[in-house]
Amino acid sequence: MFLIILFSTAIILSSGLTSLVRFFAVKLNIQDYPASPRKNHSLPTPLLGGVAIFLAVLGSLILLFWWNRHLVQSCKLVGEVTSCGTASGWSIVGGILLGAFILTIGGILDDKYNLKPRQQIIWPILAIATVILAGVGQDNITNPLYYVGLSADPLLHLKVWTIHLFGLEITMLTDLFTFIWLFLLIYVTKFLDGLNGLVPGIIVIGALILFVTSLSLGQTLPAVLSLIVAGAYLGFLPFNFFGKIFLGEAGSTLAGFLIGVLAILGPAKISITFLILGIPILDACWVIYERLVKAGKSPFQGDTRHLHFKLLKQGLTSRQTVLLLWLISLLFGLLGIFLQGWEQGILWLALVALMAILIRLTRSPKPKSQNFA
């Protein structure tokens, strides 16, 4: 019952706050104007959607603290395993909230003043450093060589080089992997935010799948956090899907940050998250390659090379493209729950093959007018 109440609270808070934030965004003229080929809307659209999502997450966590303070304080899970390592639950949740707040502030500034890429990048770096210092980190990752008989250890252990600096414990490989993982996902969802409803829908799918995975493993705190994130983005989704408000910089970067942290809080969830966001991740890597090698420009300079824009050029409508990418994320995420070990490895190969097929099919656009409906 508590989970239902918490999920409903996140949805209701997000919906109500989105309407409020939309009103103030219009009043303050913090809007996105259709002034480039990358824009598929015809009228000025309010930004700052990430502010509503952050406040919905914050409000839901306040309810969690009030209802079950012990769950957060101890970070204890059903059974004898804790996903929080040596860090306390307060440290983990506090780090996530502070990191999310940093991204929200940076997002507000970008939505208002249209920051340059070198100014935008500061906020993700600060947010990631915050959660790492709070104790969030990935100590082990799946060893792909194990499943082809080339290694006797199913895990690659990252917590092997630790130094102490100014009273802080820095685990070099763990912290480096965590930084790269979160930075990657932040920019993947930032790049992906080009069509109405695309990012919020995929985050809802991903967070709910991580909720089911965490609950099945007896990991209560990660399950609850996943449910809150799913509810916050689900409450925002209808407004964004119908073009009433955009995520803005805060909402798009928060999406990758939150889903990335949730993936770290427990075993076997990074691989599932990679499957859920596999097409966007591979698309981002391919776009960066094309920008650097083929176009000779900054990888952070926006253009229409992304898969979702190419699908539009093939004649799909905006909503058809969004639904297709939602379906792919849902399918691979669900399969990732049931397939483990070498079977999941085959699923990764299938994901790469699918991306290659999509790149090939969208290479030469059909002579058909785009429909952004």
Image (spheres, rainbow, N blue to C red):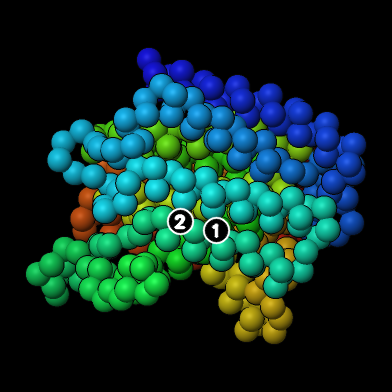
The image shows residue 258 at horizontal and vertical percentages of: 50, 48
Vertical order, 158 against 107 (above or below): below
Q: Quadrant of the C terminus?
A: top right
Q: Is residue 330 visible?
A: no
Spot occupied by residue 81 in the image (x, y as percentages of width and height): 19, 44
Is 254 placed left or right of 297 in the picture?
left
Q: How many marks?
A: 2
Where is residue 346, by image quadrant? Answer: bottom left
Task: Tell which of 173 and 286 is nearer to you.
Answer: 173
The amino acid beneath tag 2 is: Val
Give the side of residue 190 with respect to residue 297, left or right.
left
Give the number of the disc on residue 20. none
Circles 1, 2 touching at the beta carbon (< 8 Å): yes
Q: Residue furthest front?
A: 166
Question: In the shown orientation, is residue 228 left or right of residue 112?
Answer: left
Residue 127: in sight, yes or no? yes
Which quadrant of the view contains residue 291? bottom right
**Mark 2: which secondary structure?**
helix
> Measuring 26% from the left and 52% from the top, which residue is drawn there?
85
Q: CA distance from mark 1 to mark 2?
A: 7 Å
- Residue appearing at x 61%, y 54% in the figure: 102
Q: Residue at x 68, y 41 (%)?
A: 51
* Figure quadrant of the N terminus: top left
- Where residue 32 appears, as percent x and y from the top left, is 84, 49
Q: Which residue is mark 2?
A: 131
Kindly identify which residue carries mark 1: 127
Q: Residues within 10 Å of mark 1 (few under 14, many from 20)?
A: many
Q: Secondary structure at mark 1?
A: helix
Q: Position of residue 42 (x, y in %)?
A: 88, 44
Q: In percent of the image, x 30 and y 76: which residue is there?
A: 163
